[in-house]
C-alpha cells in the first residue's frame, strides 16, 4: 500500500539502559510521511524515553534511528548532536512544559525560528537592513502560527503568568515555528479539560492535513488517540506490545492486560445480576 | 495610562518603542553631552567612572543576567584589558589599535574561562571562574617583565591622530562615545536571534537545544563578548587612573562588579547603568554620612564593609529585581494609578530540585 | 622526612578547609543555597572564643563549648531571619546575599573598638607544644586540628547514620515534599542545618586560631575552602573532607617543590583540573533535569 519511500523515521532495535534499568528494550517502528503515529502505554513504559532518544537527549545503548533528512536520503540520527535535530526538521514539545519563563509568548515563538536565522553576530550588533528584514520575516512567520493557534491575546504576556492550558498551546506553537517535517508531541492533552482537548484534536488534524506535518505523539487520552491517530504503538515496560490501527491495538489482549491487569481481575469488578445496588454489596 | 496601538512589526522591533522613549532618552543624551559645561570637574570625573563601570557592567549583565552564567572572577578580564592597554600604549601603539587588542585578548581569555561552562553549571561554573580570577591575578603579579609585577604600571593619556585626551572633558567624551556604541551594540544584539538564544540558554537549556541552539557556541560567545566589553572598560579604567597594579583586579573588585549588576537589576541593560551609578556614588554617600555618625562608627575602617554588605542584603531581601525593578514598579504604579495591584511583579519561585515546597 | 613534614602540615591545613567545606555542603544539601559567609562565621567563632577566654575569663573547655553553642544559635537565627524569606530566588541572588552577610560580619567585627583591627593570640593550653618523632617535629596545634577533625567527622557520621534527627535531615534534603508528608518539620531542620554548619565553622575557627592568630580577615580562608567542596563534589559530606585534604596537601607540597606563586593558586588549579576531568567532583551527583 505504501512504499518504503514514504518512511520518514525508522527506529530499529532501540534499547537504552540507565544503570541497571532497561528503559527501552528492542523497540522497532516506522513512521510514515504524513501520518499521525501515537505511542501509548502505562506510566513508565518508556514512551518519553523513546522521544528523548529521537531528540538526542539520550543516546541508545543499541539500535539505530534513521531519519529522512531534507534531501530525502535516510540519515542515521544517533550520531547527530542534539542541537542539529531541529535543523533537520524535527521539533518537539515536552511533557513537563519547558518554556522560557521570563520571556513573552512572542519571544518564545521567535526563539523557535532560530534554525531559520540568516544573519551573523557582527551584522546583528550593527542591526543592518538585512537583520531588520530578517526580523520582520521571522515576525510574519510567528504571527502565522499565532493565528493558527489563536494565541493573539497572549502575544505579549510573560509565560510565567500564563495558565497551564495556554502554556501547552504555546509549546505547540513554538514547535510549529521551527517549520518541522516531523512533530513530536509529548502528552499534548494532559492537564487539559474537555474543550481544550477537543481544540487540540482539531489542531492536530489541521497540522496533519493543512500543514502536511507528520506527527508522532505520546498520549493517554484514548478518545483523542482514536480520533486523530492513523497507527498506534502500544508499549509496556520498555517493550513493544502491539502495533496497528487504534481499534486493533485497543482490543489487543496484551494491551488490555497492561492497562487493566489480567482478565480474571476484571471479572471481579463485574456486577452480579439480580442484586440491585453497588458493587460488592453482598447480603 | 499609555495605550500602544501596534500597527506594524517595526514598532516592536525598533529600540524606542514610543514617543515617550524618544523624548526622555533624547533628553538624557543631551544632558550627557552638555555635562562638561555644566558639571564641576570632580563630578565629571565620577561620571566618567560611571560610564567605564557601566561598560563592564554591560558585559557582565550579558553573561550573568541574560545568559545565566555565573562569573565570579570577572575582574580578571578587566585586568587583562587594562594591562594589554598599558603595555601596548607603552610601546607606542596607537590608541584605537591597542583598544582593539585589549578587547581581543580579553575575548580570547574569555573563551578559555568559558570552557568549563560547556561542561558544568551553577556553582561549579562559579568556582571555575573564581579560580581563573585568582590565577590571572597571580599571573599579573608574577609576570614582572611584562606587567611590572606588584609595583604596577604607568600609562600615558590616550592619543588619537595627534589629539591627546589629557583633560577630564576630552576623556569624558571618549568614554561617552565608547559607552554609547557598546550599549547600542548590546541592545541590537538582544533584539536579534543571538540575543534571544542567550535568553533561551538562561531559561531552559534543554529546550534551547531542541530549538537548534548550539549551547557550546553561544555560551562561548557570551563569555567572549562579556570579556571583550570588560577588556574595553579595563583599558579605559587604566587610562583614567594612569596607574594600575595587580591588587586592583582581585576578588573584591569582582564582587564589586557583581554587586553592581545585582543591585542595578539582573537581566536589564538599564540595570548595568543604575548599578554603576550606585557603585560610584556609594563611597560618596558614606563619606557624607560619616559626619553625622559618632566617631567610633564613622571613622572605623569596617564601616564601608558593613554598609556595602547591608545594602546588598537589603536589596536581595526586599527588592530582588534591583533598582531597575523598583523603578518599573514605581512607573507602573504611576501609569496605572489607582489600579495598581500588589502582586503584579511577583516572581515565580524556582528551585533546582523541583519538588520543593517552600 | 621533609616530605612527611609537609604532608602533615598539609593534612592539618586540609582539615580546616574540609571543616569549612563541610559547612558549605551541609547548607547546600538542606537549603540549596551556596553560602559564601562560612569563612566569616569561622572568624566570628574564633573571636567568640577569644572574647570568652580573655574578656570573660572562662576556662578553656567551657569557652570552647560555649562559643560552639553560641555560633550554632547564631546560625539558626541567621537562617530564620535572612535565608528563609529568599528561598526560591535565583541562585545568583542568594550567593550575593551570603556575600553581603559576610561583608557585614567582617565590617562589624572590624568596628569593635580596639579589638577588631588587631591580631590576637588565642590562649589555648597546648600552645607552643611540639613532639619529636625521630626526625619529625610535630606541632601540637596541627595534631589537635587533625584529631579534632577526625572526632567531629565520627560524631557527624554517627548522627547522620543512626540518630532520628540525622536521618530526617537526610530525608528532607533529598526530597522535601516527601519529608513534609512524613511529618518531618523541614523548615526547623533547615534552621538546624545552618546552626550545625555555623557550629562546625566555629570549631574550624577555634582550631585555626592558634596557627594563624585571630584577626578580622581570617575569613578569607573560606575562599580556599570552596575549591575543597567542589573537588569533593558539592552534594557529599565525606567528599568535603576529602576535598579539603586534597587541597591542603597539594598546597603544602607545591609551596615547597614548585616555584613561587604556585602555593596560592594551587587550590584553584586543582579545581580546574577536577572540573575538566570529573565535572561533578569526586563524590558528587549529576543533577540532570528529567524531561
Image (spheres, helix red, strand yellow):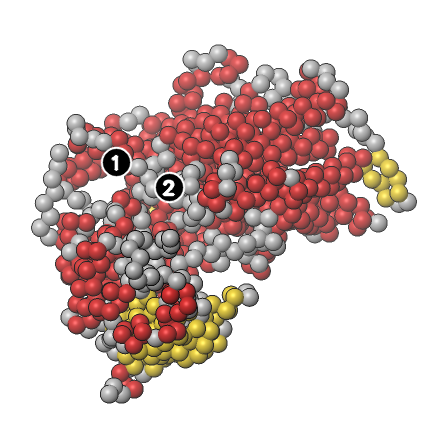
Which residue is painted at 73% across and 30% down in the image? C210
Secondary structure, mark 1, is helix
According to the image, label 1 marks what residue? Answer: B344
Depicted A63 relative to depicted A204: above or below: below
Which chain does tag 1 point to? B
Which residue is painted at 71% across and 42% down in the image? C154
Depicted A161 relative to depicted B341: above or below: below
Q: Which mark is residue B349?
A: 2
- Total number of numbered discs in the rendering: 2
- Residue A259 is left or right of residue B137, and the answer is left
Secondary structure, mark 2, is loop
Depicted C212 relative to depicted C60: above or below: below
The 10 Å Cα crowd at callout 2, few under 14, some 14 to 19, many 20 or more, is few
The image quarter in which residue C24 lies: top right
Q: Nearer the viewer, residue A83 or A269?
A: A269
The 10 Å Cα crowd at callout 1, few under 14, some 14 to 19, many 20 or more, is few
Which chain does tag 2 point to? B
Which residue is painted at 36% across and 61% down in the image? A269
Q: Earlier in the sequence, mark 2 or mark 1?
A: 1
Q: Position of residue A266 (x, y in %)?
A: 38, 65
Which residue is painted at 55% across and 66% down in the image? A20
Q: Position of residue C29 (x, y in %)?
A: 54, 43
| Marks 2/1: CA–CA distance | 15 Å
The image quarter in which residue C106 lies: top right
- Residue A283 is left or right of residue C126, and the answer is left
Q: Quadrant of the N terminus of chain A?
A: bottom left
Evaluate whether label 2 is on the same chain as label 1.
yes
Residue that extends furthest to the right in the rendered view of this protein: C134
Amino acid at each position: 500500500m505504501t512504499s518504503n519511500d514514504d518512511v520518514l523515521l525508522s527506529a530499529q532495535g532501540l534499547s537504552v539502559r540507565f544503570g541497571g534499568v532497561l528503559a527501552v528494550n528492542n523497540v522497532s517502528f516506522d513512521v510514515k510521511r504524513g501520518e499521525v503515529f501515537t505511542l501509548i502505554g502505562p506510566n513508565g513504559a518508556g514512551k518519553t524515553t523513546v522521544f528523548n532518544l529521537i531528540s538526542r537527549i539520550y543516546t541508545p545503548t543499541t539500535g539505530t534511528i534513521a531519519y529522512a533528512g531534507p534531501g530525502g536520503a535516510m540519515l542515521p540520527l544517533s550520531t547527530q548532536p542534539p542541537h542539529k535535530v531541529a535543523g533537520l526538521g524535527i521539533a518537539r514539545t515536552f511533557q513537563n512544559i519547558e518554556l522560557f519563563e521570563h520571556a513573552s509568548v512572542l519571544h518564545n515563538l521567535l526563539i523557535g525560528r532560530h534554525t531559520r536565522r540568516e544573519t551573523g553576530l557582527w551584522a546583528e550588533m550593527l542591526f543592518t537592513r538585512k537583520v531588520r528584514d530578517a526580523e520582520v520575516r521571522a515576525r510574519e512567520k510567528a504571527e502565522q502560527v499565532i493565528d493558527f493557534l489563536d494565541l493573539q491575546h497572549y502575544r505579549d504576556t510573560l509565560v510565567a503568568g500564563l495558565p497551564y492550558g495556554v502554556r501547552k498551546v504555546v509549546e505547540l506553537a513554538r514547535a510549529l515555528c521551527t517549520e518541522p517535517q516531523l512533530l513530536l508531541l509529548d502528552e499534548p492533552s494532559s492537564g487539559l479539560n474537555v474543550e481544550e482537548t477537543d481544540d487540540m484534536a482539531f489542531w492536530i488534524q489541521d497540522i496533519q492535513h493543512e500543514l502536511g506535518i507528520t506527527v508522532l505523539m505520546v498520549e493517554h487520552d484514548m478518545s483523542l488517540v482514536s480520533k486523530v491517530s492513523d497507527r498506534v504503538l502500544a508499549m509496556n515496560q520498555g517493550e513493544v506490545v502491539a502495533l496497528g490501527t487504534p481499534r486493533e491495538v485497543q482490543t489487543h489482549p496484551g494491551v488490555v492486560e497492561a492497562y487493566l491487569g489480567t482478565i480474571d481481575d476484571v471479572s471481579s469488578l463485574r456486577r452480579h445480576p439480580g442484586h440491585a445496588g453497588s458493587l460488592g454489596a453482598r447480603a | 495610562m499609555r495605550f500602544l496601538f501596534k500597527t506594524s512589526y517595526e514598532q516592536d522591533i525598533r529600540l524606542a518603542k514610543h514617543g515617550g522613549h524618544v523624548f526622555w532618552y533624547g533628553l538624557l543624551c543631551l544632558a550627557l553631552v552638555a555635562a562638561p559645561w555644566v558639571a564641576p570637574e570632580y563630578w565629571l570625573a565620577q561620571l566618567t567612572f560611571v560610564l567605564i563601570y557601566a561598560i563592564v557592567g554591560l558585559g557582565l549583565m550579558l553573561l550573568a543576567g541574560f545568559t545565566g552564567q555565573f562569573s565570579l572572577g570577572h575582574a580578571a578580564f578587566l585586568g587583562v584589558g587594562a594591562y594589554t592597554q598599558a603595555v601596548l600604549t607603552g610601546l607606542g601603539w596607537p590608541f584605537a589599535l591597542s583598544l582593539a587588542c585589549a578587547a581581543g585578548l580579553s575575548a580570547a581569555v574569555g573563551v578559555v574561562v568559558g570552557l568549563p561552562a560547556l561542561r558544568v553549571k551553577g556553582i561549579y561554573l562559579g568556582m571555575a571562574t573564581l579560580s581563573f580570577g585568582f590565577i590571572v591575578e597571580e599571573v599579573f603579579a608574577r609576570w614582572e617583565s611584562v606587567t611590572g609585577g606588584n609595583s604596577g604600571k604607568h600609562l600615558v593619556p590616550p592619543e588619537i591622530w595627534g589629539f591627546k585626551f589629557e583633560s577630564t572633558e576630552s576623556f569624558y567624551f571618549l568614554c561617552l562615545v565608547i559607552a554609547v556604541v557598546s550599549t547600542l551594540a548590546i541592545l541590537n544584539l538582544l533584539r536579534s536571534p543571538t540575543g534571544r538564544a542567550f535568553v533561551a540558554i538562561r531559561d531552559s537549556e534543554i529546550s534551547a537545544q531542541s530549538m537548534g541552539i548550539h549551547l557550546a557556541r553561544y555560551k562561548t560567545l557570551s563569555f567572549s563578548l562579556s570579556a571583550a566589553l570588560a577588556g574595553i572598560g579595563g583599558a579605559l579604567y587604566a587610562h583614567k587612573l594612569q596607574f594600575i597594579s595587580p591588587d586592583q583586579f582581585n576578588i573584591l573588585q569582582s564582587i564589586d562588579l557583581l554587586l553592581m549588576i545585582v543591585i542595578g537589576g539582573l537581566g536589564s541593560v538599564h540595570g548595568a547603568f543604575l548599578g554603576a551609578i550606585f557603585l560610584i556614588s556609594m563611597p560618596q554617600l558614606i563619606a557624607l554620612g560619616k559626619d553625622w555618625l559618632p566617631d567610633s562608627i564613622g571613622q572605623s575602617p569596617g564601616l564601608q564593609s558593613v554598609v556595602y554588605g547591608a545594602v546588598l542584603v537589603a536589596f536581595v531581601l526586599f527588592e530582588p529585581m534591583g533598582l531597575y525593578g523598583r523603578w518599573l514598579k514605581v512607573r507602573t504604579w504611576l501609569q496605572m494609578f489607582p489600579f495598581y495591584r500588589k502582586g503584579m511583579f511577583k516572581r515565580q519561585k524556582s528551585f533546582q530540585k523541583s519538588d520543593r515546597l517552600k | 622526612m621533609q616530605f612527611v613534614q609537609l604532608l602533615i602540615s598539609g593534612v592539618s591545613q586540609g582539615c580546616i578547609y574540609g571543616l569549612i567545606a563541610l559547612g558549605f555542603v551541609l547548607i547546600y544539601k538542606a537549603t540549596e543555597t551556596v553560602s559564601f559567609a562560612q569563612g566569616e562565621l569561622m572568624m566570628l567563632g574564633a573571636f567568640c572564643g577569644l572574647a570568652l577566654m580573655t574578656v570573660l575569663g572562662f576556662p578553656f573547655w567551657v569557652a570552647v563549648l560555649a562559643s560552639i553553642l553560641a555560633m550554632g544559635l547564631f546560625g539558626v537565627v541567621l537562617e530564620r531571619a535572612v535565608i528563609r524569606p529568599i528561598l526560591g530566588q535565583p541562585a545568583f541572588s542568594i550567593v550575593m546575599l551570603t556575600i553581603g552577610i559576610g561583608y557585614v560580619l567582617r565590617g562589624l567585627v572590624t568596628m569593635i573598638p580596639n579589638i577588631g583591627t588587631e591580631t590576637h593570640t588565642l590562649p589555648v593550653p597546648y600552645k607552643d607544644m611540639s613532639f619529636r618523632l625521630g626526625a619529625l617535629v610535630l606541632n601540637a596545634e596541627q595534631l589537635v586540628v587533625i584529631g579534632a577533625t577526625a572526632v567531629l567527622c565520627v560524631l557527624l557520621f554517627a548522627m547522620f547514620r543512626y540518630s532520628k534527627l540525622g536521618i530526617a535531615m537526610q530525608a528532607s534534603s533529598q526530597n522535601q515534599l516527601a519529608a513534609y508528608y512524613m511529618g518531618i518539620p523541614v523548615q526547623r531542620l533547615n534552621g538546624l542545618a545552618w546552626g550545625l554548619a555555623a557550629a562546625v565553622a566555629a570549631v574550624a575557627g577555634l582550631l585555626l586560631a592558634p596557627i594563624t592568630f585571630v584577626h578580622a580577615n581570617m575569613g578569607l580562608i573560606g575562599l580556599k575552602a570552596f575549591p575543597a567542596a567542589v573537588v569533593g563534589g558539592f552534594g557529599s559530606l565525606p567528599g568535603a573532607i576529602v576535598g579539603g585534604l586534597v587541597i591542603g596537601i597539594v598546597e603544602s607540597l607545591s609551596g615547597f617543590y614548585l616555584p613561587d606563586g604556585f602555593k596560592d593558586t594551587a587550590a584553584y588549579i586543582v579545581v580546574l583540573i577536577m572540573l575538566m576531568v570529573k565535572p561533578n567532583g569526586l563524590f558528587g551527583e549529576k543533577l540532570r533535569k528529567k524531561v
